[in-house]
Structure formats: C-alpha cells, structure tokens
Image: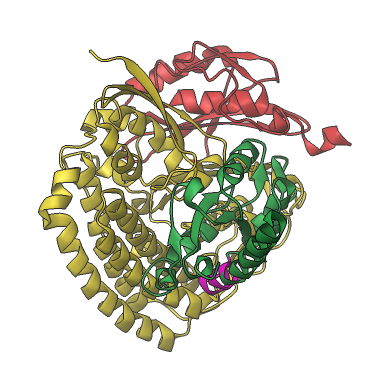
Chain colours: A red, B yellow, C green
Amino acid sequence: MTDQTFNPVTVEEIVDHSFKYANDGYRLIQIHCTKTPEEMFIIYTFEKLDLSCESIKANVQVGDTVQSISKIFHPAFLYENEIHDLYGVNFSGMIVDFQGTLYETAVKQAFSITASDKE
Amino acid sequence: MGERTIIPFGPQHPVLPEPLHLDLILEDEKVVGAVPSIGFVHRGLEKLVEKRDFNEMIYVIERICGICSFIHSQGYAQTIEGLMGVEIPARVKYLRTIWGELSRIHSHLLWLGLMADAYGFESLFMHCWRVREKILDIFEETTGGRVIFSVCKVGGLWKDIDNETLKRIVTVLKDVEKETKKMADVFTRDYTVQKRTRGVGVITYQEAIDLGAVGPTLRGSGVVQDMRTLGYAAYGDLVFEPIVEKDGDCYARTIVRVREISQSFDLIYQAINKIPDGEIDVKVKGNPNGEFLTRLEQPRGQVVYYAKGNGTKYLDRFRVRTPTFANIPPLLKMLPGADLADVPVLALSIDPCISCTER
Amino acid sequence: MSYMPKSPWLVHYDASSCNGCDIEVLACLTPLYDVERFGILNIGNPKHADIFVVTGSVNEQNKSVIKNIYDQMPNPKVVVAVGACASSGGVFRECYNVQGGVDNVIPVDVYVPGCAARPEAIIDGVVQALGVLEGKYKNMVKVAK
C-alpha cells in the first residue's frame, strides 16, 4: 500500500508533479493543509482507478502564493478556495475564484491559528 | 435568446432538508450556469481536535453527518488505529461491517424517498421511509440510538450484538428485502419515474473521472470503483462486485443505489454467517504519533480521512474529505442545459449531504 | 382561535445541524409517526407558517437566514428549537464558527432535547408549541381590543 507515502516536494514543483500524475492516469482526490505549532504544509493526494494512491507534501506559510492546479485537475478549485478561506494561503490562476467568500466564518482564516498561538 | 435571469436556489428550499445554495443563471427556462455557495453549515469541527482528546473526538466526528454517522466513526477509529498500529479483533471488523451496511441501506432508502419526493411521487417517498424505519428499529435495538449510535471507539466497540439477535436481524431483513424489491420495481420500471430521470443530467465516463466524481455518481457513469474492494473491515472476506451502470443519467444513479441496497443485504447475510466469536475491544496504549490516510466507501462515495498526531493525546489535525465535496463539480457540470424544473432532481441525484461537505 | 391548533403549519430550517435531527423531523411526517393526521403540515413558505422548527446551531453565515425566515412569518408565531445543537450549541458549542443555540438570534419558545432528538420528542415539542401559540393569539386579541 502506498497510502501512507507523502513525498516531500517544494511549492514550485507542485504543478510539475501534478502534470506527471495526470499523465500517469491519476486523479486528484483531495488537497488539504495542516498547521501545527512547528510547521505548516499542504498535501495533495492522487489516486488511480485501480485504487493505488500517492500524496505529495510541500511546506507553505500563511500568506504564501501557490500556483493553482485547477487547470490540470478541475475539482482542485474547490479545495484551493477552501484552503484560501481557512488557512490564508493564496492560489494564483484558479479557474473559479470565490475571492474568499466560499466560507464566511466568524474568525477569518481560523485554521491558521493553532492552540499554542492563542496562549 | 432570452434575457439572463439569476434565480437563487436555497438555502431554505422545500426539496432539500439541508441548506444548499445555488445561484442559477437562466435563459428563459434553461439553466446556463450555476454558482454554488456553501458555508451555511460550516461549524469548523475539525478544529475541535485541539480541545477534545483523540478518544473523545470520535463523538464529534460521528456528528459530522447524521446519515453516515456510523461510517464516520468507523473511519475515524480505523485512522487512529492505523496511526497507532492497533490490531482490532475479527469480531469487531465484522460488526463494523454489519452496522456499516445497515447504514448504507438506511441511507439509500432515505435518498430514494427524497428522490421520489423531488419528482413529486409522494406515496413512493412515504413507502421508502416506512420501510427505512425497520432498519432504524434494528439500530435502536442493537445500539440504543436511531441515527447517532456512539458504539464505535478507538480499539473496538462499546457494544456487542449477541448471536441470537444477529439471527433475528436476518429474519427482519428478509422481510425488509421483500418490501424493498417491490419498491425497486417502481424505480426501475415505472413510466413516470423514467420520464423524469432518463437522459437527465448525463455525465459521461470521461467527465465522471475528470470531474472527480465518487460513489454512485461515478459508478452510474460506468466507472468501476468501490473503496470496499480495498478490503478494510471484513470486506476482504466477503464476496461482492462493485455495482456499475453505464448511462450516467439520473436513472443510472438511481439504479446503482437500488442495486446497492440488495448488495448490502447480501453482504450482511454473508457477514452474519461468517462472524467469529471473540473480544470486542483491545486496550489502546499511548498516544497517536505520525500521519495516516484512510479511504472508505460511504453510501455517497469515497471518503478520505487524514490524521496527524504529535505524541500527545490531542491530535494536530484531523481532516475529512467527504463524498459530496467531490461530487459538487459533477453537479455543476450537470446543471447547464437542464430545465429549471429539473434542478431539484439533479441536485438530489448526487445525494448531497451538506453537513458532511462543510463540516 | 380554536381552529388554529387543529392544523398548525410548520416551516423547517436546518441551521447547522448534522442532519440527524433533520431526518428525524422528516421522519415525523412519514407513515410510522405521521403528524399529518394531527393536521400538522410541513411547508416551504415561511409566510404560510405558524411554527418555526429550527435544527442545529447558529453560525456566522446562517444567522441572517434564520432571522429572515422568522421575520417573514406572520404573527402569532412560535419557535421550536429541536435538538441539543439548536438549544445550546451541543457538541459543537466550542467550535470557532458556532455561536451557540438559536436563542442567540431569535426568541425560542420550546426546546426539544436529544442528540439526535427522537421523533416522539419532536412531536411532543410541537404539541407544546400549540399551547404557546394559542396563548400568544389570545394576548394579541386582548391588545387589539
């Protein structure tokens, strides 16, 4: 099983890797972001129809701009808008840009504040 | 060409119990575009991992959604067990499969009812929900709850089902199966039902893959993919084939679900025949550390869980990618070209679960 | 006024519920519980409704929707908060986007307990709401005189 492989890449390489996965017949199943007191990273998971699955992981910071992969994988725009609204990571070149209105939350970019930041 | 009108659909709309909002762009009666806006149900519950320890968190996770609640708790337990390297007893795997498949039957019956209601077939809606109550009675008898069970825990289950009860469940299910078959005939053969669903909202094979569709929406377009074939829980020991239909329209998606109900009955019978005796939990020692990704099949399709632990009893992150989130792009693809009157049928055909989507 | 409690119409809105209470509200309409035999109708139009059934807690985005539906309903009107989330925020109380129960936005007359609230409890809550509705109506008549 390759479910648990999270290949480290840099932010600039994300688009190249996505192209490679698209050419190999993978499709995007999720993008998510994680912020801990020590680090913040973004994970893209790709899956083939035979259910083999791989992920790439890149370190990002709040306020960084990442190139969108929504032109390669159409559904990416929803995940990217979500991460923009909840984590404050910007994406350039999204096919549909909600301009931060996908989620209207009481706390802006709530997920970018970790429990230890509050203390 | 008529003038363009924008009609807001939802959030409070009679066809959906849940607040889905779409801005429909219309030319006369034809939809030419749709813009979704979500967030009406956003609670931010993934953030609660900072306040609830990993054992308590399961009760929050199963309240992501009241329909696939059991499968959410199963997925969470499986993820944390994977993270901590806990091997669960075989009986637990079988019981989780049985409850999971019962949840699938209850979810599909609920959806069939709502779908019937969406095209105005109210008596069929009532029948689906009447039959569904018998499944809920089984839940109530075995877990104490009708929609939220709280039986799953990290490392096993809180409750066992004794073998006598399992036998009785089989007899109840045989009755339910008969009644479901009668209704299935209406969904598959009735002229009026076909009139509303055939050729409506077609998603081709390639579109379904490219747009990231999952579950019955994907299988309705002829793509063979079912997470249960990964063999998690007891699925590795049971015999089944993913159910696939070719047409990719609302009718095909309905048929996939109708056939999946009979498949679930079969899976439950198989599981009850094979279920081994034994413990229903193991002691879980220590705290989760590292990261883990799990994929499961919910009634609505594939769900992805990701957990990251840091060696304390609080997780750093728990992420859920629910099936409806993945099915929104296919829905947006179906809408252009449809009649305004067909929008409720189309919106329901992906089996939207908004509380899952927005968490 | 004796006619109104014989056929109260209700409008249901899912604030940010997990669906559990919503499907139980819907289950009340279906053959096993069948509240329609009491003349209770679930309708989509707030302007037709006497009773507002809310499930789920209030968040940033839906508080205006709840307020809007409430304002559209004609007087006298009664609000029933169904389930733990609608009553107090429930298990999600500490979420950053949850403000708590529905009573943060609109006045609530009847609280129905449970997570998820059982259909019997919901029917009981609606029946209690009828009493409140009757009382409010009498009060309105008194003020008008």
Q: Quadrant of the N terminus of chain B?
A: top left
Relative placement, left or right, of A82 versus B27 is: right
| Front residue of A70 and A60 | A70
Query: Is C124 within the magenta?
Result: yes
Who's the residue at 34% across and 45% down the image? B348
User: Looking at the image, which residue is at 42% across and 36% down?
Assistant: B326
Please state the horizontal and vertical placement of residue B158, each as a whole percent of the image: 60, 73
Q: Main secondary structure of the magenta part?
A: helix
Q: Along the line of sight, which residue is nearer the eye, A7 or A31? A: A31
Residue at 42%, 27% (x, y): give it. Answer: A75
> Going by the image, does B96 lie left or right of B311?
left
Residue at image position (53%, 24%) is A80
Residue B239: x, y in percent? 27, 63
Range drawn in magenta: C117-126
Number of numbered discs present?
A: 0
Q: Quadrant of the C terminus of chain B?
A: top right
**Is residue C10 visible in the rendered structure shown here?**
yes
Question: In the depicted view, which residue is nearer to us: A47 or B177?
Answer: B177
* Position of C56 relative to C3 (above/below): above
**On the picture, is B184 further left or further right than B310?**
left
Residue B132 versus residue B122 in the image, above or below: below
Task: Find the residue positioned furthest to the front.
Answer: C145
* Magenta highlight on residue A79: no
Left or right of B119, for residue B281 = right
Query: Percent x, y for residue C93?
Result: 73, 51
Residue at the far bottom: name it: B164
Quarter of image, res B189: bottom left
Q: Is residue C62 above or below residue A26?
A: below
